[in-house]
Image: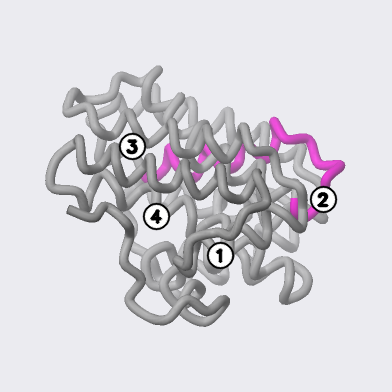
């Protein structure tokens, strides 16, 4: 059985990669629209699409072993990128290779994104500490990479806090966490995200939707866009 992800269309970026992200991850796709310049927006889309591919592995696989193999496939992609070898012709892999090589992104953070998804293969419910670690390793790590693309001088901890806040907001209603403790963690990270520089703010703008997601509000194209516009204008999530 092949565990290679199968693209639905020919591997060309940005069209099918961006279309897929806007459909499956409207929060971060919308956030990327506030980045300055098409090349930077493409870079953010590539990072978010990569994270979404990792997130699909546990959900799409028929059993944990197959999911591990899918995650290992993406780890091999990172090895190809780091070694300078040709990257397998998957649209997200090709897009990721371009942004990683162009911006010299930290391989350790990229691998941490893969590692964080291993927790999703465990059927046990997450306790709060595990959930926060998962949020830091997924949305938080991705926001750190996005901030490095937008403004290398941005504090990575502040960017990571914003990305983690977004992940926590989406997790609160689905992981059986104590709402009080989870919301306290959410608010502390939203506060820490205020340290993100203006240039890097699109890396965490989607955190402005965290409170709405924590309350179970579904994506709303107009409402979310207005909320994000307000966050970008004020520089606060």
Residue in the picture at 67% in, 62% down: 98
Residue under label 2, please give it: 151
Q: Which residue is denoted by mark 1 in the rendering?
A: 94
Whether tag 1 and tag 4 are in contact, CB under 8 A, the answer is: no
Mark 1: which secondary structure?
helix
For label 3, count other residues whose C-alpha is less than 10 Å away and answer few (under 14), some (14-19) or many (20+). Answer: many
Look at mark 3 in the image and give the residue it sits on.
172
Q: Is residue 217 above or below residue 159?
A: below
Please say if 193 is above or below 87.
Answer: above
- Toward which corner of the image does residue 159 lie, by quadrant? top right
The span from disc 1 to disc 2 (Cα, nearest Å) is: 23 Å
Distance between the alpha carbons at the discs numbered 3 and 2? 30 Å
* Mark with earlier residue (4, 2): 4
Few, some or many C-alpha atoms within 10 Å of disc 2 (few <14, some 14-19, many ≥20)?
A: some
Image coords of residue 138 (percent x, y): 48, 39
Query: Which callout, 3 or 2, points at the residue further toward the start of the chain?
Result: 2
């Amino acid at each position: 059985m092949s565990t290679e992800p199968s693209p639905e269309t020919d591997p060309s970026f940005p069209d099918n990669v961006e279309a897929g992200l806007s459909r499956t991850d409207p929060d971060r796709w919308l956030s990327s629209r506030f980045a300055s310049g098409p090349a930077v927006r493409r870079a953010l889309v590539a990072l978010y699409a990569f994270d979404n591919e990792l997130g699909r592995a546990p959900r799409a696989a028929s059993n944990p072993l197959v999911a591990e193999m899918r995650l290992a496939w993406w780890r091999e992609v990172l090895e190809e990128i780091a070694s300078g070898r040709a990257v397998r012709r998957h649209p997200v892999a090709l897009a990721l290779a371009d942004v990683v090589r162009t911006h010299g992104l930290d391989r350790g953070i990229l691998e941490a994104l893969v590692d964080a998804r291993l927790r999703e293969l465990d059927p046990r419910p997450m306790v709060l500490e595990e959930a926060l670690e998962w949020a830091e390793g997924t949305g938080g790590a991705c926001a750190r990479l996005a901030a490095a693309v937008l403004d290398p001088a941005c504090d990575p901890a502040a960017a990571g806090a914003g990305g983690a806040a977004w992940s926590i907001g989406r997790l609160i209603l689905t992981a059986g966490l104590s709402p009080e403790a989870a919301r306290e963690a959410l608010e502390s990270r939203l506060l820490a995200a205020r340290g993100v520089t203006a240039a890097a703010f699109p890396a965490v703008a989607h955190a402005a939707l965290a409170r709405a997601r924590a309350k179970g509000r579904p994506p709303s194209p107009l409402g979310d866009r207005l909320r994000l516009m307000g966050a970008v204008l004020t520089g606060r999530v």
